[in-house]
Amino acid sequence: NAGVTQTPKFQVLKTGQSMTLQCAQDMNHEYMSWYRQDPGMGLRLIHYSVGAGITDQGEVPNGYNVSRSTTEDFPLRLLSAAPSQTSVYFCASSYDRVTYGYTFGSGTRLTVV
Amino acid sequence: ILNVEQSPQSLHVQEGDSTNFTCSFPSSNFYALHWYRWETAKSPEALFVMTLNGDEKKKGRISATLNTKEGYSYLYIKGSQPEDSATYLCAFQRDDKIIFGKGTRLHILP
């Protein structure tokens, strides 16, 4: 099992550009979430999904879109990048969160200039 | 807005000493409370998930307790070792949302 795979690991974008952060898991996990980590702010929930075809907003969803067409993949789209979206992004997944908690990917460091 | 507070923000502990820190969360509509360890340059790793008031969980020298009525959880580390240096995150789960606190940064002094 590869676990939770995030690509790319690093990315630099210009303001206004769009891009997709990829997240894939091979553990047949129903639950997946995207978090962003900023200094002094901890992990903040962007969007989450409880299964294929179902997504919902977290604490800071503005400027981001998600979709969940398959159980394995949960991509995060930045529609028009802004410097405020400079952050480290973590994808997490779980089979049963109250038994196992989340398994996290290794993160994507995004810089918007 | 779900407010999850952790204290202290940062803690320095002598190797061999025991320590504990706190996570406070809303006591209404509680579903679960998670603890994670986050080492520098790595990803967070799950330590415990607790769901019932009075729950206690233990993994080696680390243990946690849960009080859902008053909305707090304690994480205890017994006999701190250098490898315990990390940020410890708690996360409050209400329904399908899991919201993290800002963490307690633990430094173990040799």
Image: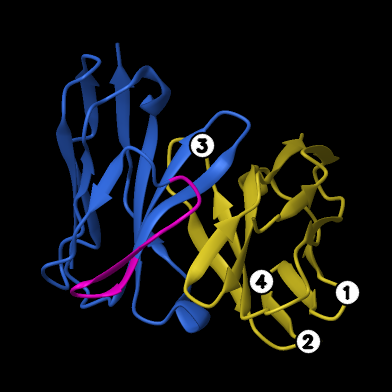
Chain colours: A blue, B yellow
The chain letter for the residue carrying disc 2 is B
Q: Secondary structure at mark 1?
A: loop
Label 1 and label 3 in one chain: yes
Residue occupying the far top of the picture? A113
Of label 2 and label 3, which has the lower sequence position?
A: 3
Closer to the camera: disc 2 or disc 3? 2
**Cα–Cα gap, marks 4 and 3:** 21 Å
The chain letter for the residue carrying disc 1 is B
Of label 2 and label 4, which has the lower sequence position?
A: 2
Q: Which quadrant of the view contains residue B67?
A: bottom right
Residue, disc 3? B40
The reply to whether discs 2 and 4 touch (Cβ–Cβ < 8 Å) is: no
Amino acid at circle 1 = Glu
Residue, disc 2? B53
**Cα–Cα gap, marks 2 and 4:** 22 Å
Describe residue A64's horizontal placement relative to residue A79 as left or right: right
Q: Secondary structure at mark 3?
A: loop
Amino acid at circle 4 = Gly
Q: Which quadrant of the view contains residue A62?
A: top left
The chain letter for the residue carrying disc 3 is B
Describe residue A81's horizontal placement relative to residue A59 as left or right: left
Describe residue B61's horizontal placement relative to residue B41 as left or right: right
What range is drawn magenta here?
A49-60
